[in-house]
Structures are given as C-alpha cells and as structure tokens.
Image (spheres, rainbow, N blue to C red):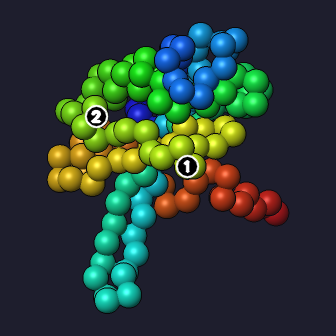
C-alpha cells in the first residue's frame, strides 16, 4: 500500500500558535506529495518535493478550530507513521512550510530533496503527484 493512499488519523495538541481552544482531538486526512520540476532562467534544472496533508473541512473548520500549523503533537505523530511506513528520517525530511502556505483544508509541508529522502520515496512506493488534488480536473467519460 502506498503511504499517500493511506488515511491517517493523527492527534492534535494545543501548542500550535494558531489553533483554537475548542477543537477535535484528532484530524483525519491523506498525505499527498508533489514533485516540482523547472528550469531556471540561466538554464539550470531544479526540482524539489512538497507535501500536503488534506483533511475533511467538515471535520476540521479552520475558521473555528484554527490552523494545525506548528502543532508539535501532530507532526511528531506524522513522523512516527512515516517511519513505520519505511521512511528512515522523516523528522529531518518533512517539516511545516511557512504560515502563508497553509490552507483551509490542508497542512502544507516542505520536503527536503536529499538523496536519502528520494530513496525513501522510491523504497516505500509513495506516489509523487505532479498536481495537487484541487487542481486536477475530472473529465466525464462517454
């Protein structure tokens, strides 16, 4: 099973800088990875990985419950789940991105692109997407 196909239920603490005082003790969602590839203006190729943990906004309302961003219990448990799924050092590979990258239905993460992280992705069969789910258009089949 691919890690990004797994639904995670992770605990949420009360230590986030932006979390409300009355929130559910857990959040359920899916971790989705995105590979970004581009060529700089000088012709140099570059790439990096990015991740988002998407949750059901009917279960976690950002306006009411706040941002999970910076919550230590959430990210520590996510790291533990990733280690159980085959990542060797997720605590060095996946960390919260800046506050402006957080969304109404996801927590945004920077993913280091060192060789070990890329190998972890390959070994664990984690799918790497080229688009976020909200940007993928579904086409009707006839």
Q: In this rendering, does residue 135 appear at all?
A: yes
Residue 138: x and y, percent?
73, 57
How far from the left and from the top, in percent, is residue 37? 39, 70
Q: Looking at the image, which residue is at 40% across and 47% down?
A: 110
- In this rendering, the answer to whether 21 lies above or below 103 is above
| Residue projecting furthest to the front | 17
Q: Nearer the viewer, mark 1 or mark 2?
A: 1
Q: Which of the two residues, 137 or 134, is positioned nearer the viewer here? A: 134
Which residue does the image show at 42% across and 22% down from the upper left?
A: 72
Query: Helix, strand or loop at disc 1?
Result: helix
The quadrant the C terminus occupies is bottom right
Location of mark 2 (residue): 90
| Gap between marks 1 and 2 measured at Cα | 20 Å
Foreground residue, 21 or 31? 21
Between disc 1 and disc 2, whose residue precedes? 2
Q: Is residue 51 left or right of residue 93?
A: right
Q: Residue at x 80, y 60 (%)?
A: 140
Tell me: 43 left or right of 60.
left
Quadrant of the image containing the N terminus: top left
Q: Is residue 23 left or right of residue 48?
A: right
- Which residue occupies the extreme bottom position in the image? 42
Q: Which residue is mark 1?
A: 101
Q: Judge whether 28 appears above or below 38 on screen.
A: above
């Amino acid at each position: 099973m691919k890690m990004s196909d797994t639904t995670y239920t992770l605990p949420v603490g009360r230590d986030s800088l932006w979390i409300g005082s009355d929130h559910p003790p857990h959040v359920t969602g899916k971790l989705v990875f995105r590979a970004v590839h581009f060529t700089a203006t000088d012709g140099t190729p570059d790439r990096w990985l990015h991740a988002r943990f998407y949750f059901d906004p009917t279960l976690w309302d950002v306006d009411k419950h706040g941002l999970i961003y910076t919550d230590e219990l959430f990210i520590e448990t996510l790291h533990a789940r990733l280690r159980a799924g085959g990542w060797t050092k997720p605590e060095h590979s996946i960390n919260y991105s800046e506050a402006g990258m957080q969304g109404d239905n996801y927590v945004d993460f920077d993913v280091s692109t060192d060789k070990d992280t890329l190998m972890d992705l390959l070994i664990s069969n984690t799918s790497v997407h080229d688009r976020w789910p909200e940007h993928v258009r579904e086409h009707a089949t006839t």
